[in-house]
Amino acid sequence: MAQRYSSDTSPAVKFAPVTKADADLPGGACRGLLVGTAGTAVLMEQDGTVRTNVPLVAGYNPLTVQQVRLGGTAADIWALY
């Protein structure tokens, strides 16, 4: 799968609530995360690299993410596409 890196600063055209799971996001890799409660997360990058204890701020986090995995303390997470 080709990696997608976006420098697009236009608003997201789609957004969906995230259920933490050790599986790909239903909409595919997102271009950012909107977080309601700041904390940490376990994230998988598009290339399959899993990062633990990634700090997420409340608000917009410009990260291309394939999975929001189980664990971490961040909550009320939305995938932006």
Image (spheres, rainbow, N blue to C red):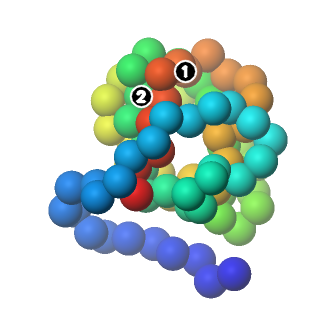
Say which amino acid is labelled 2. Answer: Val
Residue identified by numbered label 1: 74
**Percent position (x, y) of residue 35?**
42, 28
- Tell me which residue sits at (39%, 21%) in the image: 36
Q: Tag 2's secondary structure?
A: strand
Marks 1/2 in contact by CB < 8 Å: the verdict is yes
Foreground of the two, 20 or 54: 20
- Tell me which residue sits at (65%, 40%) in the image: 68
**Percent position (x, y) of residue 44?**
69, 50
Between the residue at mark 1 and the residue at mark 2, the CA separation in whole angstroms equals 7 Å
Foreground of the two, 57 or 67: 67
- Left/right placement of residue 22 relative to residue 5 reads right
Foreground of the two, 73 or 80: 80
Tell me the quarter of the image containing the C terminus.
Answer: bottom left
- Left/right placement of residue 53 relative to residue 15 reads right
- Tell me which residue sits at (59%, 24%) in the image: 40
Say which amino acid is labelled 1. Answer: Ala
Q: Callout 2: few (<14), some (14-19), or many (20+) C-alpha neighbours within 10 Å?
A: many
Looking at the image, residue 50 lies above or below residue 8: above
Residue identified by numbered label 2: 35
Q: Callout 1: few (<14), some (14-19), or many (20+) C-alpha neighbours within 10 Å?
A: many
**Percent position (x, y) of residue 65?**
57, 53
Looking at the image, residue 33 lies above or below residue 10: above
Going from N to C along the chain, the mark reached first, 1 or 2, is: 2
